[in-house]
Image: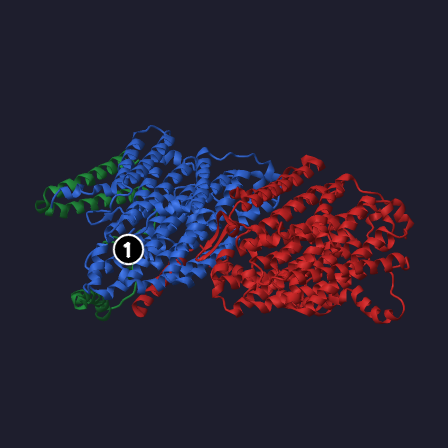
Chain colours: A red, B green, C blue
Amino acid sequence: MLELAWLILVFPALGALVNLFVGDRLGERGIHVVASGMVVLSFVVSLGLFFGLAGLDEHHRTATVHLWDWITVGSFHAPAALLIDPLSVTMALVVTGVGALIHIYAGGYMHGEQNFQRFFVYLNFFILAMLVLILSNNFVGMFVGWEGVGLASYLLIGFYFDRHDESYGHYADAGKKAFLVNRIGDFGMLLAVFLIWTSVGSVVFEEVHHGAGALTAGAATAICLLLLLAATGKSAQLPLFVWLPDAMAGPTPVSALIHAATMVTAGIYMVARTHFLWELAPVAGGLAAWVGGLTALMAATIALTQVDLKKILAYSTISQLGYMMLGVGVGAYAFAIFHLVTHAFFKALLFLAAGNVMHGLPGGELDIRKMGNLRAKMPTTFWLFLIGASALAGLPIFSGFFSKDGILLHVANFNIPLYLIGLFTALLTAIYSFRAVFMAFLGEARDQHVHDHAHESPAVMTRPLWVLAFLAVVGGALNLPVLLTMEHYLEAAVGAPAFHPNVTMEFVLLAVSAVVAVAGVGLAYGRYVKGPSTGVGRISGGVARLVSPLELVARNKWYVDEFYAAWIVGPLLGLSVWFNQVVDQGVVDRAVNLVGQVSLSLGGNLRKMHNGLVPTYALSLFCGVVALLLWFVIGG
Amino acid sequence: MASDYLPLLILILLAAGFGVIAIGLPTLLGPRERNNQKLEPYESGIIPFSDARRRFPVKYYLVAMLFLIFDIEVIFLYPWAAVLRDLRLFALVAMIPFFIVLVVGFLYEWKKGALDWD
Amino acid sequence: MDTALLFDNAVVLLPELVLAVGVMVLMMVDIGRRGQNGSQLLAGLSVAILLLGIGASVMIWGRAPVEYLDGAISDGFALSVRLVILIAGVLGVLLSRNWFPAIERQGGAFYSLHLLAVIGMMLMGTATNLIVLFIALEIFSLALYILSGFYRENARSIEAAMKYFLLGAFASTFFVYGCALLYGAGGSSKFTQIHETLATGGGNPSLVLPGIALLLVGFGFKVSLVPFHMWTPDVYQGAPTPVTAFMSVGTKAAAFAGFFRLMMTALPSFHDQWAMPLAILAVLTMTVGNLTALRQSSVKRMLAYSGIAHAGNILIALVAGTAAASSAAAFYLFAYAFMNIGAFTVTIALERQYGNENDVEQSRLAGAAERFPVLAAAMAIFMLSLSGIPPLAGFFGKFLVFKAAVEAGWAWLVVIGVLNSAVSAYYYLRIVVAMYFQQPEQAGDEKEQPFVPASRSSVFVVVVSVLAVVVIGLQPGLWADLLRGLGQ
């Protein structure tokens, strides 16, 4: 069974190729069936891998499927091989499962689009690249996938490259921004791989794992810091998170699949995959935890002030990724992956529900200030969104509650200030998620035109969501003590956690979290349902003077983009202009042209030497004779 | 070593010296009188009646070349004949292909008309 | 002496003997035929004789190398070079078949000379003796002088022959003088004997270096190394194109084979002395060849200068002077045979289109891809291969030579070689660009000219060459194993 693992890659590749070459003959329906069908088949293979792995001995649940020797240069060896272990299978199930649902959904969402075919080619390509990323058994293969998903992300963010509006500017620029910011992370990734290769002598995970003992603490820390840089790029953490909100310019299924459920979690996956290195570098781990915690907090504050439904979700994604980063930073790898899984369910659900809203409102409206009482027009979507928001807010029973608390539990043991930040963020999360629910679906309709034209989405766009909703509710059961312990399942791949909380502490913290979540929902209810219904709900009274400057900062996304524009992008652009005009055109181009001209003119002169006269030729020959004789007789 | 070549050097000096002396001595000793008769090219006593640099029919060259080739081959046969007694059958057998090639060449030039004057 | 000596190991020279007998048969058939007809018969006979020669080579392939009468050897290297020369010979005969008027009247003379040139070239690769070496050199040189002037209706052809003959005679005198000095130094005309005498401290070492210098002139002239290369463009351009195609490959293969064997079996102990001047010659040859090729307007002249540059590349292998380098050179020549003859064949086909001018101006190639898509595609493949773009045959030739040179410690020379390859890409690709991306200047009358189909034999040569260039490129290992170097 496990030997057939390569099939999982073949299907999406086949789908992309079929749609690329004969898609225009298949028609919309055909394209959709091929694209979704291939991902469903991949999902079936993933299930097969899961059961195949389950059949193995609990402590040796790992298998390598060697496909071929990819690169062999000197002692450098990078095979094309798949690593099948609980971690990669879990990721594969999420990617193909959620991916399949989103593919099905996208058939309805993209219906009638001009570039329907192109969209599904990209989407299948993304699935392929993502699977390469998570299934490769070495850093080089992972990097190929890492770059592949980056490319797919770039192509899909800029899918509407000819569009232009106020909230995103030129859509093509959003894709470019994502690509460029990610380059910084990729740079870290490459350097980390180089460093691993030079210090351990292998790029295969298993061999690096065994050889990691020989690493000095300094080398391990350097590697992990570079990996952290890579993770902050791909997983939109401080300071490289700025691309993700803009990435919402892509079609909503893309936001759901790539920029919420799967690709952005690649950084988390990568850290979990390299846990053996992080265990050697506590400093880097601590830094990762703080990066995650602060990102979570900051993104939550921004989410609180946004009015664009997708941007709220984007910032909440950054915030939730912050939680995951916090989790891997403190060594709770299994819980971070657990949260990754549940997050994939509920965030995909939320995005797709938001897509339904966008789809059902005139002009693809996303401004929650113009919504209100949409429950009346799109009841199904309301319930779906509500379930997603509850899971995001971490209301008890819902999946997000369990997974987030697993992380907070370990953080509490690690560092109390970080725990408090995490807890406060949880409060904010509850507030902003229900702020979105209340403002969009409840209350009064604030824009009659929008309300009048609102309509529910077709079945193809709601049915897959019920599956996700179901998972968002019960996903927490994956880590039900005793019965289904995902935590335990993942141990084979990411190691057992060093810390085992006692039951009392566990229950106390659970209770605290539950109270915080419920309190957040209550606060939101007070402000956005009971409170003034006109605007976003400005805080009034004495508190306002204290909070409003903060709110202003948060509304402007902490001025990070402005900071980058003024201090990094501006000077860099200036420098490139200088390089272009002075160095490139002035020095390099001229030098190149000069070489060309000199060659040509030399050639011209040499040509004139060949004047067709035998005496000239004989003279040349004779000069050669004399020169050679002189060299040999005198020089020799 | 290098001294083995001393006779060669002496020979070169002698040859060069002979030339120098043969041309130099008359210019030193002989009376110089420049008139038209004296400056005429020497043509075995006959007074030249036209410029010697004129075009000859290509057949002269052809015959000359063919003569040269077969002449040299005959010269090659002479030393062969001289040592045939020592080399015996070996040299005799070795000469057979040589002759065959020679005959084929001769037949070819004959049949191609290289020997026809007209 | 024992008569048996004449027959012992005579099998070494089997391919040469087959061809020699063949030439005589050809001459007899020629004088036996009536009137002006029968030229095609002679061509067919020549091809048959050459194929027999290839068969003979294959027959003795893989035998333990033995020497015949202290004068010739058939080791792997000699056989490899023979193969290259015989292939060039077959392709050359096929190209000449319909080419120029004189061939109808004087086909017998033409094909006999052609075959004699092949014999001389092959003998050059087997020679282990200064006298045999010189005789071989003269056999093919004299034949080529005449062949160059065979297009007697064309003044340039006669001019080419005259120049080639005069300068060739000049170079040969230096060569034979070099042989004499080397004989004086080693006391023998046999390569291995010279080496033994000198290596054991005997002989007259002071004569060795002047001898090498003069021999270099002779070889340098034949393979057209700068500054002994001046004749090359004039002769390549003036000679009938099929002859140019044949001699550009055959002469190079033969002269390099003799050059390698002499330097590596007679004078290896002087490698330190001769390697550096050869390296300088290689640099000069590559650079001057490539730079001058940049400014050529005639395709044949461009190919001539490109041939000079390729000689520089092969010389790098001799500078390295290792067994691996000599097998790399054999591979290079093998690949070069197909791509260069292929390029000349396309030139011949284009000559027919443009009215038998015995040359093609590069400016006329503009837009050729539209009019002659197959020829243009083939030409593009040959140009890409000549410029050394993988995975075509030319790339691996260069790669193996450069690799051998780096291994022998001549990295700087390889750097210059690679830089030169970059320069060469310019003029090779310019042909491709002209054919595919430029519009013919006077579009009207060019198109009105009727299409003249290429002769069947040139089509055959093009197809074989394209296949060979691609197959050698895709399976270089196979051929690299087949073609042997000295001492392998």
| The furthest residue to the front | A504
Q: Nearer the viewer, residue A478 or C13?
A: A478
The chain to which mark 1 is attached is C
Tell me which residue sits at (49%, 35%) in the image.
C454
Rate crowding at label 1 as few (under 14), some (14 to 19) or many (20 or more) other CA atoms within 10 Å: many
Number of numbered tags placed on the structure image: 1
Q: Nearer the viewer, residue B55 or C204?
A: C204
Is residue A584 visible from the viewing direction of this image?
yes
Q: Quadrant of residue A553?
A: bottom right
Q: Nearer the viewer, residue C468 or C21?
A: C468
Q: Is residue A396 placed above or below A547 in the rendered structure?
A: above
Q: Quadrant of residue A241?
A: bottom right
| The furthest residue to the top | C34
Is residue A168 visible from the viewing direction of this image?
no
Q: Secondary structure at mark 1?
A: helix
| Position of residue C73 in the picture relative to residue A386 (left or right) | left
- Give percent across and percent down for residue A498: 57, 63
Amino acid type at mark 1: Leu
| Position of residue A416 in the picture relative to residue C201 (left or right) | right
Q: Is residue A266 placed above or below C453 in the rendered structure?
A: below
- Give percent across and percent down for residue A124: 64, 45
In this figure, which residue is indicated by the disc labeled 1? Answer: C262
- Give percent across and percent down for residue C146: 35, 44
| Position of residue C233 in the picture relative to residue A379 (left or right) | left
| Position of residue C453 in the picture relative to residue C186 (left or right) | right
| The furthest residue to the left | B85
- Give percent across and percent down for residue C202: 18, 64
